[in-house]
Image: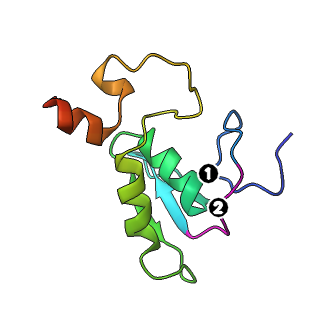
Amino acid sequence: MIDAARCPAAHHDDPTPCGGPAAVTVLDAYNEGADGCEHHAARLLASLERGRVYALPDAPAGAAIRVVRAADGIPPFAWYEGAPRTHPSQRSRAENRRLGVTE
């Protein structure tokens, strides 16, 4: 069952609450997307390769930039807290940069 109080960008396994109203649309490499609060949009973006973010018309100024910056430090599928983070695809982009990993 979908929780009506959560945005469409919230993964069903992610237990965290929304961080406000939907502010951005996150698109994947195939232009499939979901509107989301900044919190869940960042978590979704962090889990995508070649994802993009666009502010919704009534979004607060800077919403898309905040989502991109937040996603940079979030590992993919962050709600799986016990998951191993040993391979570059399992770590955040920021952590890979700190480790000097390029792919």
Which amino acid lies under the numbered mark 2 shown in the image of this protein? Gly
Q: Which secondary structure class fits the magenta region best?
A: loop
Label for residue 86?
Answer: none
Q: Nearer the viewer, mark 1 or mark 2?
A: 2
Task: Specify whether 94 is left or right of 2.
Answer: left
What is the CA distance from the residue labelled 1 to the residue labelled 2?
12 Å
Residue at which label 2 appears? 19
Residue at which label 1 appears? 9
The N terminus appears in which quarter of the rendering?
A: top right
The C terminus appears in which quarter of the rendering?
A: top left
| Front residue of this view, candidates 30 and 6 | 6
- Up the image or down, 97 lies above or below 31; here it is above
| Front residue of this view, candidates 53 and 91 | 91
* Residue range corresponding to the magenta coloring: 17-23
Residue 90 image position (x, y, % from top left): 38, 25
Q: How many marks?
A: 2
